[in-house]
Structures are given as C-alpha cells and as structure tokens.
C-alpha cells in the first residue's frame, strides 16, 4: 500500500471539532501515564536493587570500574533479553537461544580456525546461518501450529547436543576450541566486536583528572567494553522499532491477537518468522562478542541463558501471553541481573543467594505485570 | 460509476469443506445505502457465507461480483482492497493496544525515508480523536487501551475504522449479540448513520428485532440455502422470526411459554 492516509470522502459535515475536543480532553494524570508504561516495574526494581547495594555493598562497586564490571554480564544477557522481549511481545518464546549461543560460537570458531576464513566473512556467515536456523524455528512453529515453547525446547537440546558433538569432532575430543582469538587477527572488524570503545574519551578524561588513572597516566578504565555499546545501541534501536515503526505495531498486534491482526491485514506469519530470526541473530551476536573476547569457545557457552533472558524480559514488563511489553524494560531487567550477580560479591552475602533472588524477582514481576495489565485494560 | 449496479451480487454460491456442504446455492445482492440483514439459525451457513465474502474462504462454485465485476479473492487483504470490510464480533480489536494503534493496525501511515521511516503517530492520534468524536464516543485519550472501552464502543470504533479506510461494503458479524440495550442502540444508530453515507451494509444477526430496526431487506438462510429475500414493506417481524427458526416448532414453544420468543 502506497497511499494509506487518504480519508474517505468526507462523510458528514465535520462538526466544530476543535472546540468540543478541547472540552472533552481529559487530563491524563501523570500517574496514569507512568502506570501505562510497561517498563515501570523494571525501573522501580532497578532503583530498589541499587539502593540495596548502595547500603550493603563495598563502595568500590559503584566506581567506574565497578559499573563496567556490572554492565559487562548485563550486556551479554541484555542483547539476548531484548530480542527475547520482542519475540514475547510477538506472542512466542524461544528457548533455544542459549544453545544457539554455543552452536553459533562453535560454527564461528570453526570458520576461523578450520576454514581460516577472514574475520568479516566468518562473522557474516555465522549471522547468516543463525538467521536461517531462527527462520526454521519460526516456520516449524507457524506451520505446525504447535506452541513455540515445545518446538524451541526441542532445539534447546538439539543445538546443545550438536555443539558438544561438533566441538569434539572439530578438536579431536575436547569440549573447548582454542586459538580463535589469535587466528582472527586485528583490524577494524575485530575492534567492532572485541576490546573497548571510546578509548580517546577516557584518555582525555584521565588526563584532565576526571576519572581515576594509574601513576603512569593511563586511565584505570581504558574504555567501554564494546559489548556494552552493542547492548545500548540494540536497546535503543529495538525501542524505536517497537514504539515508532510499522513493524513495531505489527509485533504488538501479532502477539495481542493474531486473528484480529490477520483480519486487519497484518502479515502475522512474516512478523513472527522475522522475530525468530532476530533472537537467533542476537544469540549469534553474543557468541561472536564473547568468543572474540575470550579467544576460545566451549560447549557450556550460553548455558541457561534462555531462561535468564526470558526472566529479564518478564521483569522488563513483558506478558507471557504476548502483546504487551517493552524493549527498554528488558534492558533494565538485564542490568538488574548484572547488578545482583556481580554485586553480591561486593557484599558479605554468599553469591549463591543469586538464584533465590532470581526466582523471587521473577515471581514479583509476574504478579506486578498482571496487576498492571488489569489496570491498563480495565479488565476485572 | 453506475449507481444501479449492486455493490455485491452473488449467485448460486456453493462452498464445500470436504464432504460437508456448507453452502448449497446462496444468492443475494447488496445495494448502495442499504442495510441487508442476513438472518439464519446456527448452522445455516451465515459464517461461511461472510467468510467467503471477506476473502477467508474461496467459493467452490458460483458467481461473486463486486460492482458488476467478477472477483476471486485469495486473502482478506484482497477483499479489503476491493472495499469489502468485515467487522467480526469478537475479533475486531486488540484490547491491550491503544485505540490509535488499533485504528491504524495494518495500514499505518508512514513518514520519512528508509531507514528512518516511522509511523506518523501525530496524524494517527488526530484522526482517531476526530473519528471517535464523530461517533460520539466519550473517549478523550486515543492512547488508552481498547480494553477500557465498552463493547459497543469497540464495535463502533471498528466500524469507524472500516469506513475511514474507504470501505464500500461493511459486513457486520453479530455486532450486537454481546451487548446490552443501551450499547445496542448505540451500534444500531451508527449503522443507520453509515447507511446514510451511501455504504452497503450486510448485518448478520440472530436477533430479529435488531434486524428489523435498521434493515431495508432481509435474506433468510437455512441449511446452506437462501429461503428468500424480503423487503421491509413486505414482511412482518413475526413472519421473519418464524422463517428464521424454521416455522412451526418455534410457534409451539412460543405458545407453551405464553409469549413471543
């Protein structure tokens, strides 16, 4: 459709719209407006968690270095969580993303070490393969009309198993593949996916005594890890797509009520397939980032990340039933994760409390989301 | 455009689902500025018929003409493009989405160049607010979720959406069946308004009284066939009721219960 905005022939004399309209405009209270935002819970949770750690943890947690420490695991999880959030809003789950990280990591490593492909080609091929696998996931779900939960659960095991078998086959019996970092070489492409960004800014800040530095003048924190830059960029892009574009409206519609969406001309199947491709793509991105960072890959990479990503998305305001949620909420959800998993080591508490916290947070988030949904839709 | 050519004309429409004969020769016409009521009991084939008109099903045989030209729809989109809009009883709106997002769902106007192309939400909000005002819905904020509207308001917004996007024929699938009295009259009033604008309306209902209130002509379906089409002047409400229910049995029950069913 090219020209979608034309109104039909003016069907009735337009009443004095302006004046009446102003009278009728009800002031939407600020509280209502805030309550309507799905990421409210995640933001409130983040504030609470931050207050908790400010009051209990060692002060070094909230230094620049400490914050980078928190954000690094948050970024890896967050890239997955944002993609998972979009898919959940679109009404589906992908339980295979954790295994997808391991599998695409292996494929990427094999392209580099076994095929000796240049880095760019290896990355593009890995992304392409991931998108293909995601598309396969989506097509099976759409054509079979089975719940995506069960289809992707199958892929969770298939891909994890393939990663193990493939690793042993490629390395001659080991479950770890080394030397990827050395083979990948240096250059612009490498810098896009590993190391730190904004080194110039940090050097300047250190030179002007705005951030901490070593006696020799190099800053204690040399830059922002690129995974964090990808994380923030992805969150902004996903939020823009969701809230401002046609594709975003279609994602909400596809998850809210696929039949109604279809009746209105929304290509629901295409939207869902694209979303499955996106989650697989996000998994591949995390694989490339972490493999290049560590220089090696192993079969446990991405283990249980599918659950953490879904939990982060739910904390971020996504309903399990689809049609409602936010990408920026998943962003906050992932930061809560990073803050708690890293933050506990700065406190006197045993780090194993993390799991308890995780479950409790999930339960709270689901209860809260349910309550908010009833408020928003006026359901009783 | 010739004003006398019916908006929709179907002749001897047949639809089989495997061995099930859902429609065995249905004929009807819909003209401009007319409300054609489609009446029939459960299983009469109403749903199959409207889904065929809406492009969901393809007819097995028979003629289907829109403004005199034979058509063959492969998807609901084709029907929409031909000016046939269907408002389904419960599948019209997505309750978690805002009124604006629902109103423009599937037809969002965009601005800007790719990759910065985005939905023109200012325009959408303005149009939604104005259209809601025309219907007389006392809703002031187009950002509120559709779930907060009443059932009647939802139906009216769905109809307004179809009209706004240039529908020539509206198919309304039991728009009043789940509504209370006040809400029903709101929807019926709006249907009357739509007719005056020159659209053709196919109004499917169980309720003869609702049909009689706004209908110009009545087509009764029974067991996949048209029993007949009647002008409002040529038929009384009780006759219509009897035709629809297949006659005698209902009269017997009615007598037993001591009144009209």
Image (cartoon, coloured by chain):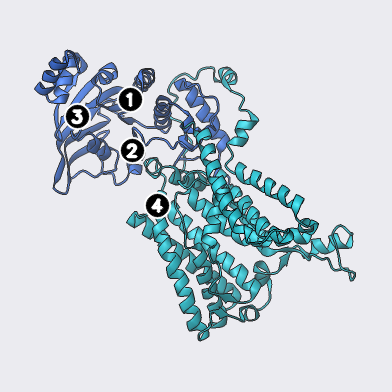
In the rendered image, the vertical position of residue B107 relative to residue B207, given as above or below: below
Q: Chain of mark 2?
A: B
**Colour assignment, chain A:** cyan
Whether callout 2 and callout 3 share a subunit is answered yes
Whether callout 1 and callout 4 share a subunit is answered no
Crowding near pointer 3: few (<14 within 10 Å), some, many (20+)?
some
Mark 3 element type: loop
Q: Quadrant of residue B200?
A: top left
Mark 2 element type: loop
**Earlier residue among tags 2 and 1:** 2
Q: Quadrant of residue A133?
A: bottom left
Provide residue A21's location: percent of width, then percent of height: 56, 21
* Residue at image mark 1: B176
Spatial CA span between label 4 and label 2? 23 Å
- Asked if residue B116 can be seen in this view, the reply is no
* Residue at image mark 2: B82
**Residues at marks 2 and 3 touching, judged by CB atoms closer than 8 Å:** no
Spatial CA span between label 1 and label 4? 31 Å
Labels 1, 4: front one:
1
**Residues at marks 1 and 3 touching, judged by CB atoms closer than 8 Å:** no
* Residue at image mark 3: B41
Mark 4 element type: helix
Provide residue B167's location: percent of width, then percent of height: 37, 32
Labels 4, 3: front one:
3
Q: Residue at x 30, y 25 (%)?
A: B32
Spatial CA span between label 4 and label 3? 34 Å
Mark 1 element type: loop
């Amino acid at each position: 459709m090219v020209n979608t905005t034309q109104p039909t022939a003016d069907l009735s004399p337009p009443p004095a719209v302006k004046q009446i309209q102003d009278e009728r405009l009800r002031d939407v209270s600020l509280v209502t407006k805030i309550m309507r935002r799905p990421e409210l819970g995640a933001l409130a949770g983040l504030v609470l968690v931050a207050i908790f750690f400010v009051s209990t943890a060692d002060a070094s947690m909230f230094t620049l270095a400490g914050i980078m420490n928190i954000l690094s695991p948050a970024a890896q999880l967050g890239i997955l969580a944002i993609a998972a959030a979009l898919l959940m809003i679109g009404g589906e789950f992908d339980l295979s993303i954790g295994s997808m990280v391991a599998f695409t990591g292996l494929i990427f490593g094999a392209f580099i070490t076994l095929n000796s492909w240049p880095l760019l080609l290896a990355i593009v091929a890995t992304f392409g393969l991931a998108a293909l696998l995601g598309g396969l996931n989506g097509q099976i779900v759409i054509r079979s009309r089975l719940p995506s939960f069960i289809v992707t659960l199958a892929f969770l095991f298939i891909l994890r198993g393939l990663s193990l078998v493939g690793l042993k086959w490629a390395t001659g019996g080991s479950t770890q593949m080394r030397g990827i970092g050395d083979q990948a070489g240096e250059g612009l492409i490498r810098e896009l996916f590993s190391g730190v960004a904004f080194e110039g800014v940090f050097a300047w800040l250190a030179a002007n005594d705005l951030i901490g530095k070593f006696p020799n003048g190099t800053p204690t924190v040399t830059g922002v890890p690129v995974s964090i830059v990808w994380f923030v960029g992805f969150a902004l892009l996903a939020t823009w797509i969701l809230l401002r574009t046609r594709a975003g409206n279609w994602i909400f519609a596809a998850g809210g009520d696929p039949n109604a969406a279809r009746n209105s001309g929304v290509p629901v199947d295409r939207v869902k397939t694209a979303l499955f491709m996106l989650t697989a793509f996000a998994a591949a991105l995390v694989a490339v980032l972490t493999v290049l960072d560590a220089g090696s890959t192993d079969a446990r990479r991405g283990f249980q990340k599918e659950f953490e990503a879904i939990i982060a998305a739910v904390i971020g305001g996504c309903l399990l039933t689809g049609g409602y949620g936010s990408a920026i909420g998943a962003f906050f959800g992932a930061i809560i994760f990073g803050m708690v998993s890293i933050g506990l080591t700065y406190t006197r508490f045993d780090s194993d409390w993390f799991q308890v916290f995780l479950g409790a947070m999930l339960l709270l988030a689901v209860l809260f989301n349910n309550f908010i949904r009833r408020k928003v839709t006026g359901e009783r | 455009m010739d004003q006398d050519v019916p908006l929709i004309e179907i002749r001897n429409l047949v639809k089989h689902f495997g061995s099930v004969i859902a429609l065995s020769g249905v004929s009807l016409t819909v003209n401009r500025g007319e409300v054609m009521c489609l009446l029939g009991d459960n299983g009469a084939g109403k749903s199959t018929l409207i889904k065929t008109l809406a492009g969901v099903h393809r007819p097995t045989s028979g003629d289907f003409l829109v403004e005199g030209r034979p058509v063959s729809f492969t998807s609901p989109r084709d029907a929409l493009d031909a000016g046939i809009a269907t408002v389904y009883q419960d599948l019209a709106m997505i309750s978690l989405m805002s009124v604006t997002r629902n109103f423009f769902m599937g037809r969002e106007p965009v601005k800007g160049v790719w990759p910065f192309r985005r939905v023109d939400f200012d325009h959408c909000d303005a149009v939604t607010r104005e259209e809601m005002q025309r219907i007389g819905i006392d809703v002031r904020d187009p950002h509120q979720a559709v779930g907060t509207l009443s059932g009647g308001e939802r139906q009216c917004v769905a109809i307004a959406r179809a009209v706004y996007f240039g529908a020539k024929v509206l198919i309304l699938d039991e728009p009043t069946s789940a509504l209370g009295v006040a809400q029903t009259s709101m929807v019926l009033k709006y249907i009357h308004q739509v007719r005056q604008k020159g659209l053709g309306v196919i109004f499917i209902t169980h309720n003869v009284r609702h049909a009689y209130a706004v209908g110009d002509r009545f087509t009764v379906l029974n067991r996949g066939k048209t029993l007949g089409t009647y002008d409002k002047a040529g038929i009384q409400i009780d006759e219509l009721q009897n035709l629809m229910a297949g006659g005698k049995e209902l009269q017997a029950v009615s007598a037993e219960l001591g009144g009209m069913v």
